[in-house]
Image (cartoon, rainbow, N blue to C red):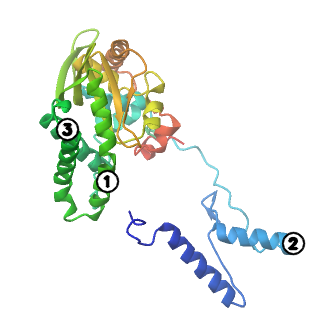
Amino acid sequence: MRQQLGLPGERQRHAEVLADLIDVLARSGRALVTWQAWRTAEPNAGSPWLERLTVFHRLAYGDDLVRRAGPVPVAPAGPPAPTPAAPRLAGAPKRLSASAWQAMVDCPYRFFARHGLGLGEAEEVAEGMEKADYGERVHEILRRFHADHPVLSASPREVLLADLEATTEAAFRGRERDDYLALAWRQRWLGHLPAYLDWALAREASGRRWRESETRFEKEWPLPGGGAVTLYGRLDRIDDGPAGPELLDYKTQNRSVLRSRLKVAGEDVQLPFYGLLAGAAEAGLVALDDDRVELVALPRPLAEASAEEGARLAATLAALAAGAPLPAHGAPETCRRCEMRGLCRRP
Ligand code: SF4
């Protein structure tokens, strides 16, 4: 957006700082640059520009410009930090959403910290519009659009596109008054509208028809040994397809990200969980944030995936009710983005 408006961007800012550095060095008879080479026991890299200068100096003059101030610090030896014992819940949860179940599958300790201790990520005041906010608006735009046009082929394409644009303008208008970033998000979504319309029309021509959007579901799921858990969630969209209802979840992500999410059975639980809630013939994720809009379907029959997920969920909750521990065992990718890292003391 900054480039389109002709405003200076990151590349220009870097070029200016580099020009300033060259200017300062060229005007000085002698220059001394210092930096903190170590943070605790971790090396702290200097600027790549200075790195380039020292490499050049070494190659040209056989002399290292760098003068180290002292020996490399050694991490103080001591007993390893104690790892907290895996906690237990006082009974299985009574209600469970798809995201809570995903947290449990990703790492039981993280689920405990979020839902047992109530330590959800601190709500930060977002001054600028963020991607989650953008996603919510896109969901609302599509809900309104399809409710107004339950049969797309009943209207000419230009009318549909104009209506989508008008719904988009209306959805972003209030936010744009006090947040210039909202303008950039609106432009981004407007760019995807023709691709979305192509996809939606082709889908309808293939015999699928929009039925409803943003529908809330709740379902009692029995647990072995008695009792039940209430599963709940809101489904983005349900279509009627040739083999029965089809569940769609809109994602403001590209299709390669979504394909990798669904590649390994059992890792992404959202669609099988929704299958438990609503019972459907098929399910998939709609990649909205790409050059073309595409459905990334669950690569296995939904009924089979949901049955397995239901059995796993019931067995896990029954074990929790019996006092099973919730160990910290997130995959490295999960741990990297986990807000509970300091709590579980995962190295
Ligand atoms: S950092 Fe990793 S192991 Fe620790 S709670 Fe988070 S996901 Fe689990």
212 and 262: which is toward the camera:
212
Q: Look at 30% across and 49% down and name the residue there.
A: 189
Task: Evaluate if marks 2 and 3 touch, with contact meaning CB atoms under 8 Å apart.
Answer: no
175 and 84: which is toward the camera:
175
Residue ranking furthest to the right: 62
* Residue bearing mark 3: 156
Q: Look at 35% across and 16% down and name the residue there.
A: 302
Separation of residues labelled 2 and 3 (CA atoms):
74 Å
The answer to whether residue 282 of the structure is visible from this angle is yes
Q: Look at 40% across and 25% down and name the residue there.
A: 325
Of tags 2 and 3, the one toward the viewer is: 3
72 and 156: which is toward the camera:
156
Q: Is residue 326 above or below residue 241?
A: below
Which quadrant of the picture is home to ligand 1?
top left
* Residue bearing mark 1: 130
- Locate residue 145, reporting x and y percent: 17, 39
The answer to whether residue 86 of the structure is visible from this angle is no
Label 3: how many Cα within 10 Å (few below 14, some 14–19, many 20+): few
Query: Which numbered circle lies on residue 62?
Result: 2
Q: Amino acid at mark 2?
A: Gly
Which is more N-terminal, label 3 or label 2? 2
Which is more N-terminal, label 3 or label 1? 1
Label 2: how many Cα within 10 Å (few below 14, some 14–19, many 20+): few
Separation of residues labelled 1 and 3 (CA atoms):
34 Å
Q: Secondary structure at mark 3?
A: loop
329 and 128: which is toward the camera:
128
Q: Is residue 189 above or below residue 292?
A: below
State the image quarter where residue 51 is shown.
Answer: bottom right
Q: Secondary structure at mark 2?
A: loop
State the image quarter where residue 63 is shown.
Answer: bottom right
Label 1: how many Cα within 10 Å (few below 14, some 14–19, many 20+): few
Q: Amino acid at mark 3?
A: Pro
